[in-house]
Amino acid sequence: KKSSAGVHWPLFDCSMSCVTPSSSKKAKLSEKGRAKDNHPLKRAHDVREKVQKRLKLSDESGSQLDNDYECDIERNIREVQAILSTNEEIFYRCMRCRKQGTEQDDGNSTTFVRFSFDVVEMNTKKSTTQFIIYPQRSKKSFDTKPFSCLPACLDDIFIVKQMSSPFTTFIDYQLFFDNSLILHYEILGPFLAKLKDHLMAIQVCLGEIETWIMEASENIDYLEKTFAKKMDMPEADCSMARMCTCPAGTHAGDTMCLGCKQPLNEHRHFKHPDYSGYFFCPYEHEHKETKLFRCKRFQVLKECRNLSVKMEGNFRISNTKARKKLKKILELVAID
């Protein structure tokens, strides 16, 4: 700007400026560095590197994933799929015996139920001799945390989805595996190796559950072979009580009803054309069926009529001597 004296004055006072040539250069370099750090490919590389470091950390057993064999992608894909298929078969066999509503809120444990047949009872009422057996129910809780929780090295890489009802507390590992195949090969190798280890831990859990469930199968096989009869296996959540249709005189008067918890002699008798009769409970119940006397669930293995002798006895079939004794009696009954 020109003054009246003809002197040119600058539009801005350079002495007041905060940007010097040296600071301006530094700012440009800083901006360039930030631009480099925010580059999409650099960010992708950093994220992959972070996950790789997590996957290569040693697990609880101290094993490391830093050799080519453990990171062989093709081999691990085949092995993981094979483990998933085996786990699925065992899983659904075990879950038939799961007690509904027993999973903890965090999914750390699940209760399973099994039925065993231990003692054959032989009794005679009037002219009928029966061989009967009562199912014994037992339950046990198992640690199922691996079904619901991923190890730290696999967690937070994908959004985990649960299985469909009624197994909504458990992770859908087949879907989890399928989703993992989109990972970059640098990540996929160690990821699959870690996933394989975790699925094997799940297989160990399933094996423990199935072994416990199947402990009773030996007695069941013996009974089916001895009596040529298919055993009726109750459902996991079924009641051990049944509406009583036993022959007259089967239960003593002081036998407790499993429905109302009162003795039989306090029940009102009602004759029935097919059975010895119904016995109505002394107290009202919400459902008609539970108003009737209920005895313990049992299964008739063999029934004989008009034998020449009255027979009574119990046989614990897990005992070899008891099995031999039962075999002799069955032979006598067949001759009679």
Image (tube, rainbow, N blue to C red):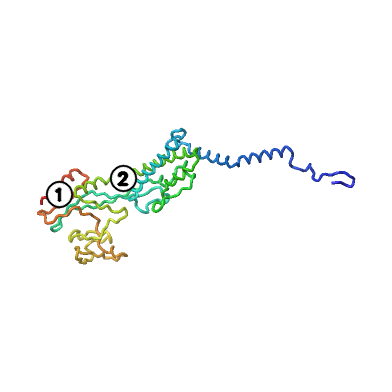
For label 2, count other residues whose C-alpha is less than 10 Å away and answer few (under 14), some (14-19) or many (20+). some
Q: Pointer 2: what residue?
A: 212
Tell me what residue is drawn at x 27 percent, y 52 percent: 233
Q: Which residue: 14% across, 46% down?
A: 328
Q: Dot 1: within a 10 Å radius of its alpha carbon, few (fewer than 14), some, or many (20 or more) residues? A: some
User: Closest to the observer: 307 or 34?
Assistant: 34
Q: Is residue 314 left or right of residue 72?
A: left
Q: Residue at x 19, y 48 (%)?
A: 226
Viewer-nearest residue: 307 or 105: 307
Vertically, is 107 above or below 200?
Answer: below
Q: What's under tag 1, amino acid-wise?
A: Leu
- Residue 304 as seen in the image, left or right of residue 184: left
Residue 238, position in %: x, y?
30, 55
Left of 214 or right of it: where is 200? right
Do the CB atoms of the residues marked 2 and 1 lie less than 8 Å apart? no
For this orientation, the residue located farthest to the front is 74
Frontmost residue, 261 versus 68: 68
Residue lying at 54% horizontally and 41% vertically, measured from the top left? 47
Q: CA distance from mark 2 to mark 1?
A: 31 Å
Mark in the foreground, 2 or 1: 1
Please state which amino acid type lies under the numbered disc 2: Trp
Dot 1 corresponds to which residue?
330
Image spot of residue 180 (x, y percent): 46, 43
Rendering coords of residue 282 (x, y %): 26, 65
Residue 150 vs residue 227: left or right?
right
Tag on residue 297? Answer: none
Q: Quadrant of residue 73?
A: top left
Count of residue discs: 2
Considering only order in the chain, which callout, 1 or 2, is on the residue closer to the N terminus?
2
Kindly state the secondary structure of the residue where label 2 is placed: helix
Q: Position of residue 39 (x, y in %)?
A: 60, 41
In what element is the residue under mark 1? helix
